[in-house]
Amino acid sequence: MLTIKDLAVSFQARRGQVDAVKGITFDLGKGETLGIVGESGSGKSVTSYALMRILDAGGKIKAGDVTYSGVDLRNATESEMKDIRGSEISMIFQNPRAALNPIRKVGHQIEDVLRRHAKATNQNARQKAIEALKAVKIRDPEQRYEAYPFELSGGMCQRIVIAIALACDPRLLIADEPTTGLDITTQKSVMDLVSDLIRDRGMSAILITHDLGLAAQYCDRIIVMKDGKIVEAGDPLSLFHNPQHPYTRKLVDATPREGETIRSLLPEDMRVPLLPHKIEDEPLLQVINLTKTYQGKTGPVHAVKGISFDVKKGQSVGLVGESGCGKSTTSEMLVRLLDPTKGEILFNGESISDIPAQKFGKSALRRDIQMVFQDATDSLNPRHTARQTIADPLQRLGGLSGVALGARIEELATLVGLPHSLLDRFPHQLSGGQKARVGIARAVALEPKFLILDEPTAALDVSIQAIVLNLLADLRAKLGISYLFVSHDLHVVRLLCDHVIVMRGGQIVEQGPADDVMTNPKDPYTKELLSAAPKPPLRRVVTQP
Amino acid sequence: MTQSTPQTSTVARQGMLDHLVYVLRGNPVTLIAFVMFALILVAAVFGPSLVPYDPLASDSDHVLEAPSLQHWFGTDNLGRDVFSRVVVATRLDLTISVAAVALSFVIGSVLGAIAGYWGGVLDAMLNRILDTIMAFPLFVLAMGIVAALGNTIENIIYATAIINIPFYARLVRAEVNIRRDAGFVRAAKLSGNSDIRILATHIFPNTLPPMMVQVSLNLGWAILNAAGLSFIGLGVRPPTPEWGILVAEGANYIVSGEWWLALFPGLWLMIAVFTFNLLGDGLRDIVDPRKRT
């Protein structure tokens, strides 16, 4: 149905041409779901943009053929492409909020595409739009028709985007990272919905994702891309059980799943034994009935409703929950950027919640409690080099300067595995993994006793996530830091943490030793979280005949 | 750090130079603007020693002569060389506009940064004050200020600065506000920076790229404003050469056919303003580290 032959795409950049896709060939059969898996920069999205002919300015198809049901998409005129887009081939984008017009009712946005492809008249457009909303299982479609995107949750917005994509009954659906940024339970419901719709309507689909586990669960066939080339293709099971290409093996290894240890995420040659970390019985941090209430427009908003837990010296605690559960508010209070409404935080037996967040910067305890932020890009000052960023806490709180400062920065760079030559680069000149390392180096610069990790790997590719998680495990053993690892991904938390706390709606629903919670969850919500995570096939050692 | 500083700074300087060359090569308009800006600067700095005649010396033998090889822009009613007067006036006009823009940049940035960072009552108060200033017709306000304070060059500078403050304050306020809760600001708090240090070293430098566009446009506008005030007889007084006065004096002679008296100072003024307007985009690209690769 879709044939791509030797497709090459290049972009005109500041320093000459950049080849994003370097000659790839694949077919897509009728009713088949194909997964394109690769890390950022692998050219997986560019491939789909090229076949829809929606490349950014400066990008062009250099060579190759794209044929869809006998139509040559590469040489089709723009008006022919406009008829094909939406009615024959549809696309779901990564960020549903950005894909929707923020000041237009969602119902009208569905009508627009129906009218464009003459699938509806003015008389029946509304009714057809409501049918489209029903198809994506939105409750109360008549009321949702009148909603604006900002009134809907991320998962709802993605359903609307899917409704728009499927409104004209396309025969091929391209989903470009459709669930990135969504909660894990929402991810599951969105992906289940998409796969049901694909099956019911007999459509073909291309799922573009960085998550090999997700692709394995929903696709019939997977293509692995790296640096604009296809390195391996095959069905999910054989890809997992017997990866041929070293890169595929690396990706398979780095995908977290049951029964793995943190070291087995790394390629085999990097698996040095993990140093044990010592957990003492004494509590380092005690949280007692911590509460945060905001004054909202429609009355008080209870972000955190009185939670209590302990973190022992040297212990790593995972704080798990979905967006809006209060885990970020909790971590902001613990790191003393935010004042709690009620409750106490004891650090080494000393109450730190009495010191207002405004004044905590001058407290002697400031250097003991640090944080690694979620978005490495956002947490680095765009005008500061890596060196300046790491120097900041050392100068302000450590009182270092001159040669001692320079030496300490280089020591830290070595500790987090950042080449010294990169220290004089600005954040935009660093890769995602390198930015994460700079952020970690800054946080551990003063050897804090307690470090909050706010989803430090959420924005990273899996192979880099594997390296960062291992780096964190090594640092814990070397420096004896206690971690509070905030995440939505239970599989990742299990790898790093000794103890797990599950939060929902501002309350703790379950807590206990990590293995207990993971293997024998008691609360239904924990069970739901666990079952929602994509289940990649388990690794099986295939002995050579 | 000290050991690597010399090396680092040469690398940084090298990078800056490369970047400058890149920006200029990528955008010919910016290149033209920079060349014209350089010419204006030369005229401002060396003008008085470069011009062929004394701008104040009258010559009764050559009154109201049309442009010729001796007098490129002709002569005025007292026989003074118009070209010399126009070139010499560059320094005064540039000084007024640069001083006024610098003042409004500093005051506006401080006010805007405070309002944007702390918000609340302070922000609301500042905004109302700025609204009040902006509610006046700005040129009329400048006229009023100069008339009230007295007819001096300093007062032209103050007047021009005051009417420009709201633009800087609002721009900085918005730019600071969107970065107030950014990750790198929270990280800076964890590193023990005080609020003022965060504002000055972390947030404010990030607001510079759009500010540069504003500064450049504003320079041109401030020149026009100063010339305008002189044109209506406020501020700089004759016989000091100043573009606004030159145009005002020349305007009287247009009806009698001596067009060069008003045309050339006006043209020079236009070119100067045009240069600053073109300069903005280039300046922004130069101060933005993200444009460097």
Image: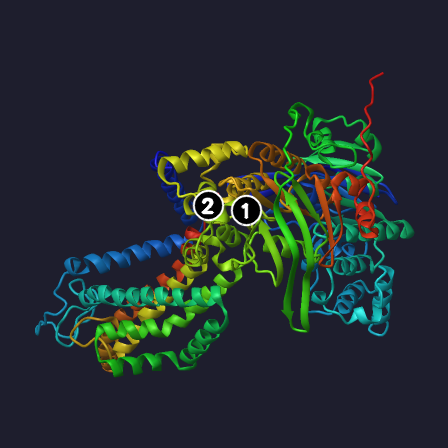
Query: Residue A421, image x and y in percent?
Result: 47, 33
Indicate the quadrant containing the C terminus of chain A: top left, top right, bottom left or bottom right.
top right
Give the chain of mark 2: A
Give me the residue at 21% from left, 76% from top. Answer: B152
Give me the residue at 49% from left, 40% from top. Answer: A445
Indicate the quadrant containing the N terminus of chain A: top left, top right, bottom left or bottom right.
top right
The front one of A24 and A528 is: A528
Measured in 3D between alpha carbons, the distance from the residue under mark 2 to the one under mark 1, in whole angstroms, is 10 Å
In which image quadrant can residue A64 be found? top right
User: Would you say residue A75 is visible in this rendering?
Assistant: no
Earlier residue among tags 2 and 1: 1
The front one of A311 and A250 is: A311
Query: Residue B40, image x and y in percent?
Result: 27, 59
Report which residue position mark 2 lands on. Answer: A393
Query: Residue A181, image x and y in percent?
Result: 70, 51
Query: Residue A297, image x and y in percent?
Result: 65, 73
For numbered disc 1, what is the local secondary structure? strand
Give me the residue at 39% from left, 81% from top. Answer: B137
Residues at circles 2 and 1 in contact by the CB criterion of under 8 Å: yes
Q: Which mark is residue B67?
A: none
- Badge 2 and badge 1 both on one subunit: yes
In which image quadrant can residue A254 be found? top right
The front one of B213 and A299 is: A299
For numbered disc 2, what is the local secondary structure? helix
| Mark 2: few/some/many CA within 10 Å (<14, 14-19, 20+) | many
For the residue marked with disc 2, what is the amino acid? Pro
Query: Does B4 appear above or below A31?
Result: above
For the residue marked with disc 1, what is the amino acid? Gln
Give me the residue at 82% from left, 37% from top. Answer: A221
User: Would you say residue A406 is visible in this rendering?
Assistant: yes
